[in-house]
Image (cartoon, rainbow, N blue to C red):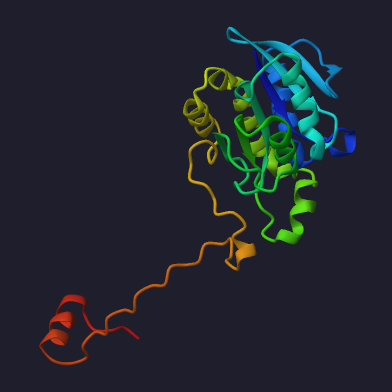
Amino acid sequence: MLVFAGLGNPGAEYANNRHNVGFMAVGEIARRHSFFPWTKKFQAEIAEGRIGDEKVLLVKPQTYMNLSGQSVAAALGFYKLEPSALTVFYDEIDLVAGKVRVKTGGGAGGHNGIRSIDSHCGKDYRRVRIGVGHPGDREKVHGHVLGDFAKADRAWLEPLLDAIAENAGYIVRGDENGFMNKLSLAVPGSGTAPDAEPGAKAKGRSHIRQARPQPPQAKLPESGPMAAMLKRLFGKDKG
C-alpha cells in the first residue's frame, strides 16, 4: 500500500490558492482513477483506490498547512507503513510555474507543510514539487502562495494536473524520471526542463533576461584600394 498526500489548507476561501495545488493534484488523481468517495479520518479527507495493481490511499490533511505532519503520520502509523511508502504533492516557489520536480528526501526549503511532515515522519519520502513561481520579492511570498491562480494560469495548470493524474502509475512503480518525462511532453516547461534560479529578483538580478550586448561594428575604410573595391561591389552611397 502507498500513501499519496496532497498539501493545502481546508476551506472554500483557500480552494484556488497556489498553496493548495497539492490538494488539486490528489483530487484529480482520485477522479481519474475512480477512487472511492472522500471520507474523514486521520484529521484528513481520505480516499482509497487502486492505480494499476497497487492500493493507494489519498490524504488531504485538514489540519491547515503548518500541521500537515500530524495527519500524514497518523495515516502511516495506522497502516504500519514506512516513510518510503509516502509521496507528497505540494507547491514549490523555487520552480517556475508549471514545472515539476520529483525527489526523495531533502530539506523543507521554507515550506511549512513539508517541515511539519519531516518532523513527524522523517525525511525519507518522495516529494513531488509543483512549481507555482516566485513573486520576485521575499516580502511578497506569503501573499503569492495564498493568492489564487490567475485565469491565465489555467492554460498550464489544467493540463498539468491532468498529466499528473494520468501518469501517476509511474510514481507507483518508482519511475520518477519516467513520470517527469511524461509531464514534460504533456506540458511544455514541466518535467525535466532546467530549474529556474530561485528568487532571482530578490537576489538583485532581474527575472527578465538581459539583452546580450552586440560587438562594435568594424569601421569601413573611406579611401584607398579597399574603399575602391567596396565601391565597385556595392556601388556609391545613395542620398
Q: Does 188 sit left or right of 73 as displayed?
A: left
Q: How many marks?
A: 0
109 and 24: which is toward the camera: 109
In which quadrant is the C terminus drawn?
Answer: bottom left
Q: Does 231 sit left or right of 170 as displayed?
A: left
Residue 16 visible in the shown view: no
122 and 95: which is toward the camera: 122
Q: Residue furthest left?
A: 225
Q: Residue furthest top?
A: 53
Residue at 62% across / 49% down in the picture? 94
**Relative image position of residue 156 (x, y in whole percent):** 63, 38
Where residue 120 sits, quadrant-wise, is top right
194 and 112: which is toward the camera: 112
In which quadrant is the N terminus drawn?
Answer: top right
Please determine whether, in this image, residue 109 is positioned above or below residue 228: above
**Relative image position of residue 78 (x, y in whole percent):** 76, 15
Residue at 69% across / 36% down in the picture? 118
Q: Does 199 sit left or right of 218 as displayed?
A: right
Residue 44 visible in the shown view: yes
Q: Does 189 sit left or right of 35 as displayed?
A: left
**Relative image position of residue 227 (x, y in whole percent):** 17, 86
**Relative image position of residue 204 (x, y in whole percent):** 60, 68
Please determine whether, in this image, residue 180 is positioned above or below residue 175: below
Please determine whether, in this image, residue 237 is positioned above or below residue 123: below
